[in-house]
Structure formats: C-alpha cells, structure tokens
Image (tube, helix red, strand yellow):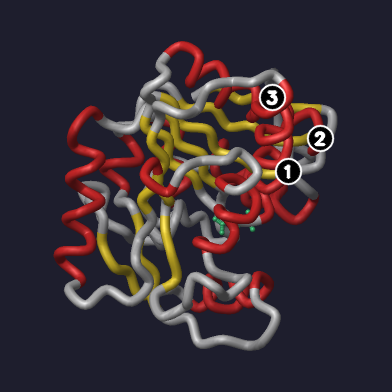
Amino acid sequence: MKLKVFKDHNEQSAAVAEMIIDCVKTKPDALLCFATGDSPKLAYQLLATKAIKENIDFSRCFMIGLDEWIGISPGNTGSCHWFLNEYLFKPMNIDQSQIHLFNAFPKNEKEECRKMNKLIAVNGINLMVVGIGMNGHIGFNEPGADINSLAHIAELEETTKIVGQKYFQDKVTIDKGITVGLKQVMEVEKLLMLANGKKKAPVVKRVVEENVSTDFPATLIQQHKNGYLMIDSEAASELKTEVQ
Ligand code: PGA
C-alpha cells in the first residue's frame, strides 16, 4: 500500500482525478469502478471538468458502480444511481451503453449479482475508487464480510444505517445494500481509497496501524498489490508517522 497525504481535500481530489485520467490514457478501454459518497465527490467534479476541457476520450471505457442501497429508487437524490449520474456520467457525457449499475430492486438477486460478476470477470477492473465507512466498510462489505466474496447483497450494520441517512433528504429505511465483493476489490489493478476531514482521522489510523482483518475491511488495502490510500492532512492527523 502507498500512503499519499495531501495538504487539503482539493489537492487530494485533483490527484485522484489525474490518476483516473492517466488510467484511461494508458488503457482507453479500461473498466472503472466508482464509489459514491462525500469522499470521492470533489474528485469526480474535478475529473469531469478536466476531461471535458482537455478533451480526454472516455468513449471506449466502461464504468460500473461499486454498490447501491436496496429499495432506493434511482431518482432519489440519496441513491448511488443519482449521485453517479449527477456528478460523473452527465457532466462527462458518458453514454448509458458504457455504464452498468446495480438494480436497487432486483427481481432475482442472484441474477443481479451474476450480471456484475460477469462484467468484472471478462478483463478485471483496471481502477476502482472507494471511500471508507466509519465502521471500515468498503462498499457494503461490512465488518466480518467474506474475503472471498463476489457481488452480493449484504445486511447493513447499524453504523451504516445511521451514517447513511446523511445522503437522504428524508428519513429512509436502509437495511440492505448490493455491492461488489471483497475478492473483486482485492483483484483490481489499481485501488484508490480516499478519506478526508477530521472525522475520518480515527478511521484512517485503524486502516494504517491495525492488523489486517475483515473486522475492519479497509485494512485489507495494506495487502493490496497496487493500493493507494489517498488522504488529506486532517484525515492523516492521528497517524503515528506521516509517510508521503
Ligand atoms: P463518505 O462514505 O465518502 O460519504 O464518507 C464513505 C463510505 O461509507 O464508504
């Protein structure tokens, strides 16, 4: 794992945007997997602005969503669908034929997971962006998740249900999520894990300083062959040593 500490959230996000652009320049038909949430939002906004301004060709790549809340409609501003469309796909003029997101209302749950697994299995994910949950989750791989899991539906932990309300205008019931699995996360070619702000400092400390365990899934990045923990100085403020 490489730890990259940036002066502030803006610098951190600009670096993330740059890494996504570099990936697509190197591999124009890359498979990219994107998380939603407060951690990657600015990076996506900067990416869209830069990609349009510099006319970077994303037309051959394919984009998948890391996860989705089960039972939340795509039109809800708290859904992962809405977020990715609003901050990434629409501003970048990404065609719907280049996108696959989990259906929040799967008629057949196994089939819904199989569709995502099939897409990922073809050539693997070239680059994945993830945040870190307050309970250490990656996507909806909650504490105790199976290291060998592929896409699956997960029961959400209490922390995720409570923290997750921040994305929604009105109170919602969020009990389950559908997510890319930990095995698929660990197999991505490049993993960008983002955290910013003071409230993520204790979480980042655990990711860096605790032993690797699925009890705090984000610690798995320590064992990723090409994992970048990209954080701002506030998120780094509780680390014993700050390594650049
Ligand atoms: P956040 O969420 O980026 O909104 O902090 C992170 C997560 O729960 O994965």
**For mark 3, what is the residue?**
15
Circles 3 and 2, Cβ within 8 Å, touching? The answer is no
Image coordinates for residue 206, horizontal then vertical, percent: 57, 46
Label located before the other in sequence (1 or 2): 2
Q: Secondary structure at mark 3?
A: helix
Residue at image point 83% right, 34% down: 8
Query: Is residue 58 depicted above or below 68 in this figure?
Result: above
Which of the 4 image quadrants contains residue 178?
Answer: bottom left
Q: Nearer the viewer, residue 130 or 242?
A: 130
Tell me the distance, in whole angstroms, between the alpha carbons under discs 1 and 2.
7 Å
Left or right position of 152 against 131:
left
**Residue type highlighted by circle 2:** Asn
**Residue type highlighted by circle 3:** Ala
Label located before the other in sequence (3 or 2): 2
**For mark 1, what is the residue?**
42
Q: Where ligand 1 lies, by quadrant?
A: bottom right
Residue at image point 45% right, 74% down: 157
Q: State the quadrant of the C terminus.
A: top right
Q: On residue 161, which mark appears? A: none
Image coordinates for residue 60, horizontal then vertical, percent: 40, 26
Circles 1 and 2, Cβ within 8 Å, touching? The answer is yes
Left or right position of 31 against 90:
left
Residue at image point 36% right, 23% down: 29
**For mark 2, what is the residue?**
10
**Dot 2, crowdedness within 10 Å: few (<14), some or many (≥20)?**
some
Q: Nearer the viewer, residue 216 or 68?
A: 68
Label located before the other in sequence (1 or 3): 3
